[in-house]
Image (cartoon, rainbow, N blue to C red):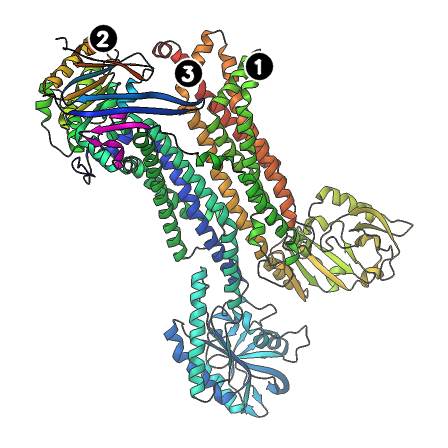
Amino acid sequence: MRVKWGTIGQRRVTKPWRAAPKAALSSPLTLIVAAVTSLLACFLGTAAVLQASAAGGATIAYQSGITCPDSYGPVFGKGNIPVKDIPAVTGAVQRHAGAHGFGAPVVGQYTTVLPGTQFNGDPNYKIRLAYRDQAGLDNLSLQQGTRAPGLWLGNVVADAEHIGVGTKPSIQGIGLPPVTGIYRDLLDPPPRWWCSQQSGAVVDRLANDPIDSIVFATDRKTFDDAVAAIGLPKMQYFHISFYEPAPATLSAAEDLLQRSRDLIADVRADLTAQGLGNLVAADVPTFERSVQIARQAQDNVFVSILPLALISVLVGCAGLGTVALQWYQRRHAQLRLLSARGSGPGALGGLAVAELGLPILLGGALGAAAARLLLGVYGPPGVPDPEAELRAGVVAAGVLVLSLALLALVVAVRAHREFELGRIRREGNRMRLLGYFPWELATAGMAWLGWTRLAHYSTGSRLGNPLPQVDPLALTYPVFVVLTVGLLTARLAWLALHASHRARFWSRPALQLAIRRLAGARAPVTGVLVIGTLAIGTLATGIGIANGQEAALDTKSSIFVGGNARLDTDSPIGMGTVAMPAALAQNSTVVGELTGTGGVVLVVDPATFTKGAAAGDVPAGDLDGLLRQISQPNPNGTPVIRVGHTAKQTTQLPDGLRDAVTVADLPVFPMIGTSPGYVVSRTALDHGQLDRIPKWSVLTGAPMADATAALRAAGVFIPNRISRESALDSLPFFVVSWTFSFVALLGAVLGVVAILALLVAVEVRRRQNALAGALVLRMGMRPRTLLASHLMELGALSGLAIVVGVVCGVSVAGLSVPRFDPATFLAPRSELPDPLPFVLTVLVVGVLVVAMAGWIAVRSVRTARTAELIRA
Amino acid sequence: MPDKPIFSLRGIGVDYPTPAGVVTGVDDISFDVPARGMTVFAGPSGSGKSTLLRVLGLFEQPVRGTLTFQGADVRKLKHRERRALRRHHLGLVFQNPSDNLLGYLSVAENLRAAAEAAGTDCDPGDILGQLGLHGTGDWKISALSGGQQQRLAFGCVLAARSTVILADEPTSQLDEGSADLVLDTLQYLVDQDFAVLVASHDERLIDLGARVARLHKGTLDAVEEREPQP
């Protein structure tokens, strides 16, 4: 028969639980530690989600920037479309556009070349009649005339042939509307609004374009009437698109893409119903790919940072577990009392939550808010999806729930074991077994797996493929190496401290006391060491790799282009018959390029080269000296700087130049890169030799737009141009950089945790330190020696973390950066930026932390000397 | 006819795991605790007094022997039933006065909290009056002396209406004057027909006991039945 001992289980919230939040105020340090731990865990969990989403947003922004602005949505087009069918297509698009959230479609129509057009009585002009919605209003630059119905003629022909406003052209006797405006011709490359219309709206004079001018009708009626009057059966180019705002987020882009597909389907169905099913091609030509790329970039970043984010959240949870244990110790008497009064482990866990729940919730909310607000500081330059913000909130809530559950669980388990099971023998100790498990071997295995992927990483990247060539597993390699080293350091430190009782340095009491203090606090010492090592290691790795990729992108594009911008020109400016425009004189140079003997020969101007060209890693002063040397005549041949020398490189130079006499060797040079080549001074060449150089370019440090405007104003012809920003596809670099910027963020957060953990550990031991310090002072130790002893203890701990973290982090970053190079075909290979500033910063911070912790450790010794010893 | 024992111990043994191996805390303790009057566990430090009290307070599960409470085998109870037993029948008073009270509650609130825990109600003024702590209901715990705190701890047991009071060295942390007040309180509780079980080596307290169980190195040396000294 079971005996009832009264009510089983209490459902009421009794006084101690109701008063718990107020009781928590008795230990502000525990509250602060709990809040900060929760803040950091939620910050990292939230930041991981936001970082990945912002990477997607940044990719969309990047892709939007390199995509024509009317190509984000659907594009309908057809070459040589029958004129009679155009109204049906236009009408179908107009009918359905609104239903899918699109504005007014922009229709572009371009006739075939119309020879025999007469202006001012001359019937030999060849024009293309064109119309594009909104064109006359906003996107052409009107030089003369008005917006009255009529035709707008390009200024090149109008100025050259003195065709003015009011002229009435005709085609084979058919009158056209009068010229009501003269606009500035669209040059290649045209303004961004015209990007998709280049084949119809731009006269390519370089390609010997047969068209004299594109003549725009000011409105659709004028255009339609003119086409009807001429009797054209077909339109050469027909194009309908939408100028939608560039989507800021990946989800907005995906929504736009889906709406575009839906509109295309509806228009197709409509046209099919009219018997015009396959009349036009309809697609989302480039943006579909952009969305794929953004999705992949987001997924890559997310998968790459996921292990790290999980580890960091687990570290946060472990921190909260420690807080729970510390709270349990501090509230032990109260818990025992409540347990004696019949409270169960669950209720006692609930008491912990009641007491520490509020600071944990506040800290977590603050962490999540900080992660969102600071995203612009630490994350990719993109906008996260609203859904991602929601997911980040859910993650933060999940971390908080996990933290609170862990807090309750730790307290409940301890209370159950101590107050219900007592000291009965337990079979084995599973937690101890977990400690014996060689976790470092597991992480080393993961690192090895990542390394094998990393070894093939760069071979996967190739020119022309915009998809970031990223292997998420390879991206985790540096983190697992750091983790392995951190765990190994912890295990060795643990064993060393375990064996430290054998150390006998009583002749140096400061050292002996420092060792004993470290050994006495083996668990917190090992904890601080492993967190510190991880912090510095991940910080070094993250900063090194992220900065390395950004520097590589900068250097590669600079070397590839030769300067901030390169504008290919005709020979007058190369020969000096046209002077460099004044606006470019201070930051530009002219180079000539010869080929023909298997390598590039760059002809440079020694006086201006270092002003306009990007010299890469070669110091400008050194380069000036070398350029002076190759400017001196040499009786044995042409003095040259030899670049990227190989055994196959001959001394023979093209175009009748005398054989090369090498003055100096350089591994890399602007425009040449690391390929075999020579640099020749133009002063070493005579006029005839200069005249035979087929290609001249202006290298400038000025922005592309300024340089283009200045050279065009000087009448310099620019057949081709390239800027540093657009020279390379930056995305693969960015994806690596974004991933490792999160690693650096995690390192920074872990660093804060390590510093706080050290300071809190010292503060918690303050009374013990004070008593022990007072005792040894009474035994004759000098205060300075006592301080030195504490500095030795803290310095050894911090120093070991710094040395191991820096060596490991910098080595891993140094090994990884070249392998993460997504453009190995371009010189130079990515390399680790100078780690010295980072190392110095870490050292300074380390010294400051040790000094502060040392001060905390000894500050109470003097006051404790009498009173505390008596109490003890 | 003698009272039915409230606790009955038969061959009770408790072992502790230590880094040096298993240590026996108490061994082969057989003993009946009557339902009223004071029983004192006496003996030097390390004799097993506190361990035995932990067993009776259900904090420790014996590895050997049988413990019954009012005839029911305690080892067969589920954890929640053991908690219910503690809640409604056992009142524990620990050595350190401040460990028996919730420092962030006032004196009266402590009494109410103890009553609430047991699912009962109490009149703090009445209890404080019985303990000679008139007018301290609104005081903070820190305003009470050690002796007053320990008496208040016994007041909490009264508030919870426990049937058995288990006190571990209740006077060891007190000066002589304060200890006297606690002895008075214990006598008062005995007079109220509580079963009071005390572990102590305080001779004055031992003299109060109707039964004195002498422990030595974890075993029961002798049980003295005697007339308590006034």
Task: State the CA–CA distance, disc 3 to disc 2.
Answer: 38 Å
Q: Position of residue A52 (x, y in %)?
A: 47, 53
Compare residues A158 and B77 and report the one nearer the observer: B77
In the displayed structure image, the side of residue B142 where residue A839 appears, left or right: right
Which residue is pictured at 41% across the width and 16% down the height? A770
Instruction: Out of B30 and A141, give the one closest to the viewer.
Output: B30
Q: Nearer the viewer, mark 3 or mark 2?
A: 2
Instruction: List the residue tagged with mark 3.
Output: A770
Residue A616 sits above or below residue A579 on the image: above
Q: Which mark is residue B203?
A: 2
Residue B116 left/right relative to A276:
left
Q: Quarter of the image holding residue A541?
A: top right
Quadrant of the image for the C terminus of chain A? top left
Question: What segment carries the magenta color?
Answer: B55-79
Cα separation, mark 3 vs mark 1, equals: 22 Å
Q: CA distance from mark 2 to mark 1?
A: 49 Å
How crowded pointer 1 is (Cα within 10 Å; few <14, some 14-19, many 20+) is rated as: few
Q: Quadrant of residue A258?
A: bottom left
Q: Do the residues under discs 3 and 2 have CB atoms within 8 angstroms?
A: no
Residue at 53% from the left image edge and 15% from the top image edge: A510
Q: Callout 1, which amino acid?
A: Phe
Question: On the rendered image, what quadrant is the N terminus of chain A found in?
Answer: top left
The mark nearer the N terminus, 3 or 1, is 1
Q: Which mark is residue A529?
A: none
> Type of residue at label 2?
Glu
Q: Are marks 3 and 1 in contact (CB under 8 Å)?
A: no
The tag on residue A505 is 1
Instruction: Reply above or below: A600 against A280.
Output: above
Q: Chain of mark 2?
A: B
